[in-house]
Image (cartoon, rainbow, N blue to C red):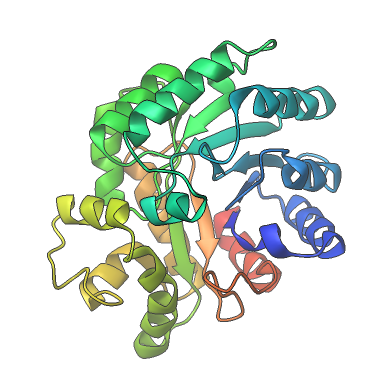
């Protein structure tokens, strides 16, 4: 499962949701955002017994390599082989809000990886994954990390990403799911999530390389774009889209349930535990 809402949920609810995911049998939880102190993934790990936790992502503009490396080793020592450090370069608008200039982002990421390699106790390349979409970022993921975590993509993208990465490199795309069977309701809920991402040039440019045109990516997205990015319908239909990614070459799929109760822009709403229960019978 991939969830943004743990980042703003009170500790007791975080612990309860993590324990439920663990009990349901899910293999991993991707945290949509995590601070550099890694306190949130540590809390999730403490509340579960076998669940792996990955950050999707730690923004490399918000920290320095040395303290992040120290935080990684704190978690790895306490919870061996259960934590994967996901890193990314975020987006120009987000970075500008931090008072930083978004220049040469991929070069900045490479320098950050240099810092992790040069820390007092380095973070191994196999312990980190990079948010990557375009060819140069995928190449960096294959060369300097365990692999790539592409976001807002289709199974057709996964085919191309696997070819670019080659064999033996982790490919873990996200897949958004809307558990609604009425087309109007499902697409409306999907658009409430998608419109946030269509304001970000990184995502729009990648979608256009996949064959979506200016009309598809305008506003809150065309029906064609929504249907390609969001697996809406029954749990069985959602599971089929996950299998499509696996058949296309993914090693692992991070499933994000889109719920009317979660507002990404406003950072409100609790983890979607009820929907995770509904999906478990089909996914696990």
Q: Is residue 228 above or below residue 218?
A: above
The answer to whether one can see residue 154 in this image is no
Q: Is residue 174 left or right of residue 262?
A: left
Which is nearer the eye, 87 or 127?
87
Residue under the point 31% across and 76% down: 220
Q: Residue 168 appears at what percent x and percent y?
A: 41, 21
Image quarter where the N terminus lies is bottom right
The answer to whether one can see residue 283 in this image is yes
Q: Residue 265 appears at what percent x and percent y?
A: 52, 71
Q: Is residue 183 above or below residue 228?
A: below
Which is nearer the eye, 84 or 9?
9
Residue under the point 59% across and 74% down: 262
Q: Is residue 78 left or right of residue 235?
A: right
Q: Residue 193 appears at what percent x and percent y?
A: 44, 72
Q: Residue 79 appears at what percent x and percent y?
A: 80, 30
Residue under the point 43% across and 52% down: 96
Quadrant in the rendering for residue 93: bottom left
Q: Is residue 248 left or right of residue 81?
A: left
Q: Is residue 213 above or below residue 245?
A: below
Q: Is residue 251 above or below residue 57?
A: above
Q: Please tell me how many numbered marks the rendered image carries.
A: 0
Quadrant in the rendering for residue 20: bottom right
Quadrant in the rendering for residue 144: top left
Q: Is residue 194 left or right of residue 213?
A: right
Residue under the point 31% across and 33% down: 104
């Amino acid at each position: 499962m991939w969830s943004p809402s743990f980042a703003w949920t009170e500790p007791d609810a975080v612990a309860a949701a993590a324990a439920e995911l663990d009990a349901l049998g899910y293999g991993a939880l991707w945290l949509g955002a995590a601070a550099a102190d890694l306190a949130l993934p540590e809390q999730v790990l403490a509340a579960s017994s076998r669940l792996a936790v990955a950050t999707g992502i730690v923004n490399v503009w918000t920290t320095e390599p040395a303290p992040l490396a120290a935080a990684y080793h704190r978690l790895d020592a306490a919870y061996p082989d259960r934590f994967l450090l996901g890193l990314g370069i975020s987006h120009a608008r987000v970075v500008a809000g931090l008072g930083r200039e978004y220049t040469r982002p991929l070069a900045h990421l490479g320098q950050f990886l240099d810092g992790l390699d040069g820390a007092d106790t380095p973070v191994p390349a196999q312990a980190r994954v990079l948010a990557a979409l375009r060819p140069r970022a995928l190449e960096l993921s294959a060369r300097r990390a365990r692999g790539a975590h592409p976001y807002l993509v289709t199974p057709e993208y996964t085919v191309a990403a696997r070819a670019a990465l080659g064999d033996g490199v982790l490919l873990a795309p996200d897949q958004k799911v809307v558990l609604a069977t009425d087309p109007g309701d499902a697409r409306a809920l999907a658009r409430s999530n998608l419109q946030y991402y269509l304001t970000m040039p990184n995502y729009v440019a990648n979608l256009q390389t996949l064959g979506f045109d200016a009309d598809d990516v305008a506003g809150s997205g065309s029906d064609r774009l929504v249907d390609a990015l969001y697996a809406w319908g029954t749990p069985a239909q959602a599971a089929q889209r996950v299998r499509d990614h696996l058949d296309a070459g993914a090693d692992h799929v991070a499933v994000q349930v889109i719920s009317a109760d979660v507002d990404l822009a406003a950072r409100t709403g609790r983890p979607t535990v009820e929907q995770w229960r509904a999906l478990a019978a089909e996914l696990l």
